Image (cartoon, rainbow, N blue to C red):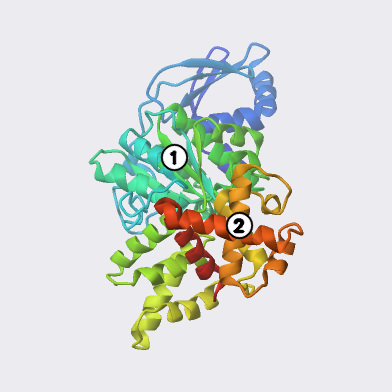
Amino acid sequence: MQSFKTWFEPIKPVRLDNDILTIQVPNQFFYEWLEEHYLGLLKKTIKSELGDKGRLEYQILLDQQASESQRGGSWINEDVEMINANQIQNPFVIPGIKKMRVDPQLNSWYTFDTFVEGDCNRLARSAGIAVADRPGATAFNPLVIFGDVGLGKTHLAHAIGNAIVQNGSNKTVLYVSIEKFSNQIIQAIKNNSINDLINFYQLVDVLIVDDIQFLANRTKTQEIFFHIFNQLHQSQKQIVLTSDRPPKDLDGLEERLISRFKWGLNADLQIPDLETRIAILHKKAEKERTSIPEKVLEYICYHVNSNVRELEGVLISLVAQASLNNKKITVELAKEVIQNFVQRQHKEINVANIQNIVAEHFGLPVARISSKTRKREVVMARQVAMYLSKNLTDEPLKAIGEEFGGRDHSTVIYAIKAVQDLLDTDQEFRSSMQSLEKKIKMTLAY
């Protein structure tokens, strides 16, 4: 009974001309749904009532251009005037409150100016700016922004929408999460207003959908979203999607949806490097109108490197602790705050941990440092690690040599002298070593 109310009651007969019955349906999605799910029933009924030569034609309400196409034995004729947008129910408006324009549902703080650019996000940010400048007119449609939690996907998606709104265009922009979209579909089905919901979304010029991974295993939501996506894309409307993983890795989604998500550009957000993390905290401190010592910012960024959300959370908590307890913002206070945010295993400054950090610094597998190879870049990394092990630990030279593939103490002495000579003569090398030593102390000594 519910299916009849949803898919057959809205149909209006237009005319019967000889063997051709013309019916009016609310939109393209409605037509596609009938053809996909009820084609057999429709054919059987037409044949029963009009004979073997009977045909069914459609008039689609939301299309102005007249066109004719054939699909599965049926014909459509799209020549009915555009429906008045003000007659369509807006699912983002509280019932009883009239609001003619569509609220884009955007967070005004999330802009390109407040989004710190780094190597980790440059492609996605640049693509976002291009989309904001020419929505629907670039090859980036859809633009899919993906990455782990807390790396700025939602921020960047809102920034695109805000930029389009601020550009002064008349385009209708709308941000919606998959959770809200799915809930709207459930309510629309309950209220027998699914057509209003579909009509509303087809009027949007720029649709921004957050967390598409939550489409997984929601068959009805995927079905409706697929047809809305098609209509918007065919009309050169801009679509921006975010996900916690690339489309090819999304489970529980229909293949036809995944293939469409690959049509445009898939841009990833990666974990920001140290310099970008520090820049992000500077921006956040400016917003909070708080002055924070540089060494405190560096300490936080050395120890919080999983995502931006956690990084900002530590900063906000640090400022609150200092303000409420009338304390100065110091490294010691930062240590206390971080312990509440980040689960850690105690790390001490030992030879093994120094090897790990030095290997990362030189871009080498840690096992290579202790190997027998005499390649120049490996030898340099090995000597630097030996030098720092001597300076930062209490291990005797023989024990240090053992940690580097069983080398004797004379090899360690030679390495220390080689590094010291470079420190005395090469300013660039000296600066690099100072940064490396600082990183070891801040990463391990806490």
Residue 408, placed above or below residue 22: below
Pointer 2 or 1: first along the chain: 1
Residue at left offset 68%, top offset 19% = 47
* Outermost residue toward the bottom in this view: 325
Q: Is residue 35 visible?
A: yes
Residue placed most toward the observer, 20 or 335: 335
Q: Which residue is mark 2?
A: 415
- x, y (%) of residue 50? 63, 17
Residue at left offset 46%, top offset 30% = 233
Q: Secondary structure at mark 1?
A: helix
- x, y (%) of residue 329? 36, 79
Q: Secondary structure at mark 2?
A: helix
Q: Which residue is mark 1?
A: 123
In the picture, measured across the screen, residue 324 lies left or right of residue 221, that is left
Q: Distance from label 2 to label 1 (Cα)?
A: 42 Å
Q: Is residue 89 visible?
A: no
Q: Amino acid at mark 1?
A: Leu
Q: Amino acid at mark 2?
A: Ala
In the picture, measured across the screen, residue 220 lies left or right of residue 86, that is right
- x, y (%) of residue 197? 46, 45
Residue placed most toward the observer, 220 or 411: 411
Q: How many marks?
A: 2
Q: Residues within 10 Å of mark 2 (few under 14, many from 20)?
A: many
Residue placed most toward the observer, 320 or 244: 320
**Quadrant of the drawing holding the C terminus:** bottom right
Q: Residues within 10 Å of mark 1 (few under 14, many from 20)?
A: some
Residue at left offset 64%, top offset 11% = 53
* Outermost residue toward the right in this view: 406
| Nearer the camera: disc 2 or disc 1 | 2
